[in-house]
Image: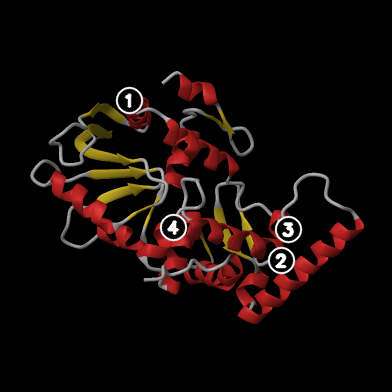
């Protein structure tokens, strides 16, 4: 059976803008990706295609391009905190408007390059804009994927403690049913155990992984945290919050990068962020 292809970024320009409008004209990157997937009905197979050798999915990468070009033509804008919103122009544009302005934008770029050849990088029209300044995150995720298992475990424990856990114990061993560890999270005067699992994936985590993790927790606790260096399919996100089942909190690669930046674990938050390789070498 021929795999279902992932649409090009050009085919995602209008769906991405429509997704932002559909969630109230502003949203985080995760919300926009999730809504685009739902509106376009992308299946698990399409969501699982990795982006080259990188940790993210090809679909998320192309949606990132599909955010950057509407920004270039004045339809979207984004804050330093990663919240994207429509402009007055973006709220009134039609699909034909997006196509026309995108074509005009690329034409102006080609004319500008003929007048003044680029001195930095080659690569065609796609080099004109950067998708969400993701380079530091891609570098960070590559670093996380290269860590030895014990290094990654130490990082996970440290992150949980920085985030408010009063203890974090790695229990990942044969017979644990997929549970990597348990921590005690303190919220004001109340504390409770949270089971966690870390998946170092390059692609997407599907709904089955969420169900398996919940099954491993059965009878042992009612709070779960699933962390991945990749991303979660739309079905996995729905499964995590399914009515009548133990809720599972999800942290994808994008969220993991932001947490490491927030707590300055291996990331120096100057302007956007700067990777600190020696931090990971010392884990």
> For numbered disc 3, what is the local secondary structure?
loop
- Say left or right for 175 vs 16: left
Residue 30 x, y percent position in the rendering: 45, 55
- Name which of mark 3 and mark 4 comes first in the sequence: 4
| Location of mark 4 (residue) | 49
Q: Nearer the viewer, residue 46 or 70?
A: 46
- Name which of mark 2 and mark 3 comes first in the sequence: 2
Quadrant where the image shows the N terminus: bottom left
Q: Which marked residue is nearer to the observer: mark 1 or mark 4? A: 4
Marks 3 and 4 close (CB-CB < 8 Å): no
| Location of mark 2 (residue) | 73
Residue 62 x, y percent position in the rendering: 55, 60
Residue 10 visible in the shown view: yes
Residue 226 x, y percent position in the rendering: 29, 45
| Location of mark 3 (residue) | 124
Q: CA distance from mark 2 to mark 3?
A: 18 Å
| Location of mark 1 (residue) | 150
Marks 2 and 3 close (CB-CB < 8 Å): no
Q: Residue at x 67, y 76 (%)?
A: 99
> For numbered disc 4, what is the local secondary structure?
loop
- Name which of mark 4 and mark 2 comes first in the sequence: 4
- Which mark identifies residue 202? none
């Amino acid at each position: 059976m021929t795999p279902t292809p992932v649409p090009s970024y050009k085919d995602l320009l209008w769906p991405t803008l429509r997704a932002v409008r559909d969630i109230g004209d502003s949203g985080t990157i995760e919300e926009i990706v999730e809504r685009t997937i739902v509106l376009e009905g992308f299946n698990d197979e399409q969501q699982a295609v990795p982006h080259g050798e990188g940790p993210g999915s090809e679909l998320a990468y192309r949606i990132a391009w599909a955010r950057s070009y509407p920004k270039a033509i004045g339809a979207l804008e984004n804050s330093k905190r990663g919240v994207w919103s429509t402009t007055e122009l973006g709220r009134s544009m039609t699909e034909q408007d997006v196509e026309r302005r995108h074509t005009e934008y690329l034409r102006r770029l080609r004319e500008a390059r003929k007048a003044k050849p680029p001195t930095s990088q080659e690569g065609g029209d796609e080099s004109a804009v950067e998708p969400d300044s993701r380079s530091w995150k891609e570098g960070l995720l590559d670093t996380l994927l290269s860590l030895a298992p014990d290094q990654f475990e130490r990082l996970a424990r440290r992150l949980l403690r920085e985030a408010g856990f009063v203890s974090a114990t790695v229990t990942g061993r044969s017979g644990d049913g997929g549970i990597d560890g348990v921590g005690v999270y303190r919220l004001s005067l109340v504390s409770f155990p949270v089971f966690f699992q870390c998946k170092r994936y390059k692609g997407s985590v599907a709904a089955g992984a969420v169900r398996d993790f919940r099954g491993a927790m059965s009878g042992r606790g009612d709070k779960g945290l699933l962390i991945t260096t990749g991303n979660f399919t739309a079905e996995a996100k729905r499964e995590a919050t399914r009515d009548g089942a133990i809720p599972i909190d999800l942290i994808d690669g994008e969220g993991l990068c932001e947490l490491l930046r927030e707590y300055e674990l291996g990331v120096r938050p100057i302007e956007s962020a700067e990777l600190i390789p020696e931090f990971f070498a010392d884990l």
